[in-house]
Amino acid sequence: DAKTTQPPSMDCAEGRAANLPCNHSTISGNEYVYWYRQIHSQGPQYIIHGLKNNETNEMASLIITEDRKSSTLILPHATLRDTAVYYCIVRVRSYNTDKLIFGTGTRLQVFP
Amino acid sequence: NAGVTQTPKFQVLKTGQSMTLQCAQDMNHEYMSWYRQDPGMGLRLIHYSVGAGITDQGEVPNGYNVSRSTTEDFPLRLLSAAPSQTSVYFCASTPTGLGGAIQYFGAGTRLSVL
């Protein structure tokens, strides 16, 4: 199964864009990239996902490189409430399998 | 809209005891799964189910059993609790189908085994 690699921690000033990188060099052609975040010890919260095109929603943007070996999650205007652990995940799906492969995540600290 | 409901929220067990962690979803999702999260770590998949009557093992299945008799419920059973099973357990569900879809997580069950 494809693995993901993320920096363990990052800081960001409030109001600035937070750019969180992720490497997934062994991803297969039909595997999606998902981003979730976890605030304190709550259940993970879905942010965004994509296959090969860039995606944007009300929370964030996802930029996936053309070779699909890496991606970047962008929080355009970080707030203190965005402080959390962010997980870049490869979703492995087939007719009888549906798995999210979590890495260890990036702890984002947003400071005033 | 209840979403994914896990019970209990907290549990303390003695080594060797058995118990069942409950998970229920009201979204008619076919796919359900159980994860564990140890301190400072990401989530690891224990067992999952792609529909009623079908279950399969994830990354760390040893010491756990599951069954899926209905679409709504996916209980996780600890057969003989061990201190190594002290963790936070999350249940998740998602609709199946083509393309990407979102997994919805419960609030978690915090388990301590003494």
Image (tube, coloured by chain):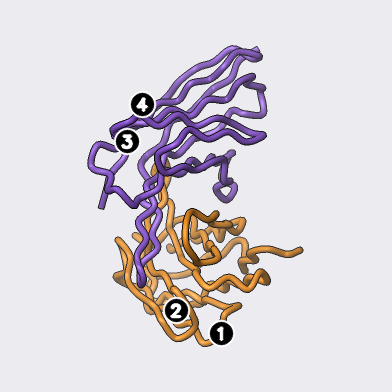
The C terminus of chain A lies in which quarter of the figure?
Answer: top right
Residue at x 60%, y 77% (from the top left corner): B72
Residue drawn at the location 40% of the way across and 26% of the way down: A21
Q: Nearer the viewer, mark 3 or mark 1?
A: 3
Query: Dot 4 falls on which chain?
Result: A
Q: Residue B18 carries which label?
A: 2
What colour do you see for chain A? purple
Name the amino acid, label 2.
Ser
Q: What residue type is labelled 4?
A: Pro
Residue drawn at (37%, 47%) of the image:
A90
- Marks 2 and 3 sit apart, C-alpha to C-alpha, by 44 Å
Callout 3 amino acid: Arg
How dense is the environment of label 2, judged by Cα within 10 Å: few (below 14), some, or many (20 and up)?
Answer: few
Q: Which label belongs to residue A7? A: 4
Please identify the residue farthest to the right as the structure is shown.
B1
* Same chain for the residues under marks 2 and 3 in the image: no
Q: Name the residue under label 3.
A: A68
* Image position, residue B34 (x, y; %): 46, 65
**Which one of the lettered chains is coloured orange?**
B
